Amino acid sequence: FISSSKLFLELPLRTPEDYDRFFEWCQANFDFVIFPVERQDDQSEVAEIMKRCHCIITTPLSNVEDLEAYRDYYISLADRKRVILSKVKFVAWDYVENHELNPERIAGIVGSERYLGEVSHSELHTRKKNRLPVQQPALQDGLFSRQYEQILCRLIG
């Protein structure tokens, strides 16, 4: 089950008990639940979600500065007892394979036990996401599927 990012607008979750009941229901009815959150989402709701989730997946862009910034941000949240650092996992987003930054180097920056893999950059994917016209066939759909499948297998396993 993967919820939409608008799910929490539709659910009447107001108190910590509401969140507890909702998460108990999710655990009883699904093997695996992913809640996507956006930067513009209500931060108090996001905090309530993060407290209860088994894992927090963050998607920095695949450059050294972004990876280091995300790592440092989650370390600071952990220092302030807002997240448990061992729950935080990283997926390099818009990954462009080059000699400067490779999966081994990413794992070295964020920790190999916390690095789940990468999702390649695709102009086609960006155009689809932004609902722009697509002129070419979906050449990389198989690659995306394999990358997502590998990430999910690492999460579940």
Image: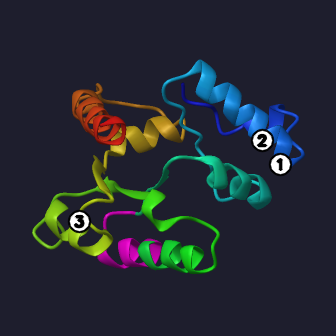
SS class, disc 2: helix
Q: Amino acid at mark 2?
A: Tyr
Residue 16 x, y percent position in the rendering: 83, 48
| Contact, mark 3 vs mark 1 (Cβ under 8 Å) | no
Q: Residue at x 55, y 29 (%)?
A: 2
SS class, disc 3: helix
| Contact, mark 2 vs mark 1 (Cβ under 8 Å) | yes
Whole-number angstrom distance, CA of label 3 to CA of label 1: 35 Å
Residue 11 x, y percent position in the rendering: 82, 32
SS class, disc 1: helix
In the picture, which quadrant includes the C terminus? top left
Describe residue 34's horizontal placement relative to residue 50 as left or right.
left
In the image, which disc is placed on residue 16? 1
* 96 relative to 77, above or below: above
Q: Residue at x 38, y 78 (%)?
A: 68
Mark 3 against mark 2, which lies toward the viewer? 2
Q: Which residues are magenta?
A: 61-70
In the image, which disc is placed on residue 107? 3
| Circle 1 crowding by C-alpha within 10 Å: few under 14, some 14–19, many from 20 | few
Q: Residue at x 52, y 47 (%)?
A: 54
Whole-number angstrom distance, CA of label 3 to CA of label 2: 33 Å
Q: Amino acid at mark 3?
A: Ala
* 36 relative to 67, above or below: above
The rendered magenta stretch, by its main secondary structure, is classed as helix
| Contact, mark 3 vs mark 2 (Cβ under 8 Å) | no
Residue 82 x, y percent position in the rendering: 64, 69
Q: Amino acid at mark 1?
A: Pro
Residue that numbered label 2 is attached to = 19
* 130 relative to 57, above or below: above
